[in-house]
Amino acid sequence: MDMKVLDIGMNYGDLSALILTIGGCLALIGAVVIYKKWSMGNHNIENEVLMWAGGIVMLIIIQVFVKIMFGM
């Protein structure tokens, strides 16, 4: 068990970069989806914005949790 935790801890930098990359891609996709809805005349996009922003915030929370869990 200790060896697995050590391996994950050593690869935390890669995992952190991967999580941030996924978050950036999701932010771009969300921005395009929201812009498309806005430009098509649908001005009731609050729920869509909250959904996309919540997903990105969740990725950041997961990243912090992994950092705390493995003591980095």
Image: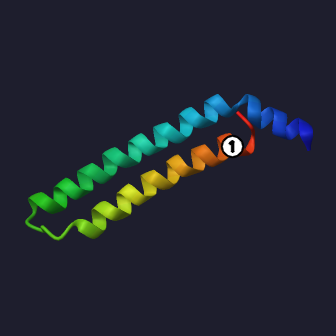
46 or 22, nearer to the observer: 46
Q: Position of residue 37 (x, y in %)?
A: 17, 62
The residue located at (69%, 43%) in the rendering is 68
| Color theme of the render | rainbow
Q: Position of residue 41 (x, y in %)?
A: 8, 66
What is the number of callouts on the image?
1
Check disc 1 and report the residue beneath it: 68
Q: Which element type, helix, strand or loop, lies under badge 1?
A: helix
Residue 33 against residue 27 in the figure, above or below: below
In this picture, residue 21 sits left or right of residue 2? left
User: Which part of the image, by quadrant, shows the C terminus?
Assistant: top right
Residue 40 against residue 5 in the figure, above or below: below
User: Which part of the image, by quadrant, shows the N terminus?
Assistant: top right
Q: In which quarter of the view is residue 51 placed?
A: bottom left
Residue 33 against residue 8 in the figure, above or below: below
In this picture, residue 35 sits left or right of residue 21? left
Q: Position of residue 23 (x, y in %)?
A: 45, 44
